[in-house]
Amino acid sequence: MNNAIFSSRVRQALRVMLVLCLLPVSYQAQAQWRLGLTGGGTWNHYSINKQYMTDYRYVDEWGGMAGVTTQYNFFEWLGLRAELNFVQRNYRHTRYEYADNLSVRYENNYLLLPVTVNFSFGGQKVRGFVNAGIYAGVWLSGKRGGTEMNSMGGGSAFQFSEPYHFNSEKDQRGDFGYTGGIGIEYRFHEHWLAQIEATCYYSIISTTKQYMDHQKDYRYNTTIGLKAGIAYVF
């Protein structure tokens, strides 16, 4: 190897080393931590195969949500976001045969941990953003109440309200799925910003285990949330 080629490769290696050394400095200049609180409402769709029970109807229901968010921005337009959210995934069960006389509302409380990539665009104060990623969660508790028919009492209706008791053979309490959102934020102070966001949690794990050999019973939640939040920027 002649001296010219050797010198050229040394210069190239020095350039690469210089770039690698400057990357942490660049990240420090761009990087930014934020920590915030959010709260809002949910609209849950419960997807279920009703099999032969054609007179059954499952109706979407409102709920609530609240959480803590943290985000690390590598650049002004790119960040990694993690949240810990309490999310209600409610629905109502009615039957056509009894019109509105039979109606039971199910309240289901979940703890969800979404991790998303955050893409943002806009100016220094007002920016739009899009989040996309995955989430994992757990079904914490449930409650059911409304009007049912007493099959042992001549078909008379009765009111009830009770906590939901999990069945380890049937209920799948772990959850996993895809999540995404779109929103807008306003930087009203050097260290403070406010956000409004619409988000979706799309579950790919059934809420029921397939414990029956002769029949599959898949049930899924798809939850839309609308929330507002405030965050401190370090």
Image: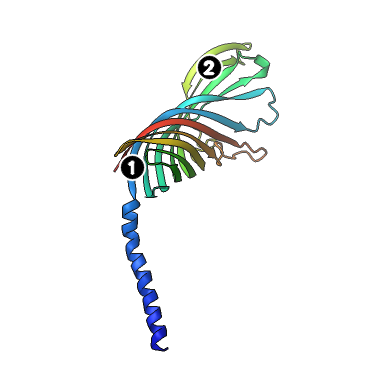
Which label was assigned to residue 34?
Answer: 1
Quarter of image, res 85: top left
Report crowding for label 1: few under 14, some 14 to 19, many 20 or more residues within 10 A (C-alpha).
some
Q: Closer to the camera, 141 or 122?
A: 122
Would residue 143 appear left or right of 214 to someone viewing this image?
Answer: left
Secondary structure found at label 2: strand
What residue type is disc 2 on?
Gly
Which label was assigned to residue 116?
Answer: none
Q: Is residue 111 above or below residue 29?
A: above
Where is residue 66 drawn, in percent x and y? 40, 31
Find disc 2 in the rendering and name its residue.
146
Report crowding for label 2: few under 14, some 14 to 19, many 20 or more residues within 10 A (C-alpha).
some
Would residue 219 appear left or right of 189 to someone viewing this image?
Answer: right
Q: Is residue 65 visible?
A: no
Residue lying at 67% horizontally and 18% vertically, measured from the top left: 96
Would residue 204 appear left or right of 109 to someone viewing this image?
Answer: right
Of label 1 and label 2, which has the lower sequence position? 1
Secondary structure found at label 1: strand
C-alpha separation, residue under disc 1 versus residue under disc 2: 43 Å
Where is residue 166 drawn, in percent x and y? 48, 32
What residue type is disc 1 on?
Arg
Where is residue 185 drawn, in percent x and y? 41, 36
Quarter of image, res 218: top right
Residue lying at 53% horizontally and 17% vertically, measured from the top left: 146
Residue lying at 53% horizontally and 21% vertically, measured from the top left: 105
Residue lying at 38% horizontally and 70% vertically, measured from the top left: 16
Colouring chosen for the image of the structure: rainbow
Q: Is residue 54 visible?
A: yes
Farthest-out residue, bottom:
2
Q: Closer to the camera, 144 or 195?
A: 195
Location of the C terminus by quadrant is top left
Where is residue 62 drawn, in percent x and y? 50, 24
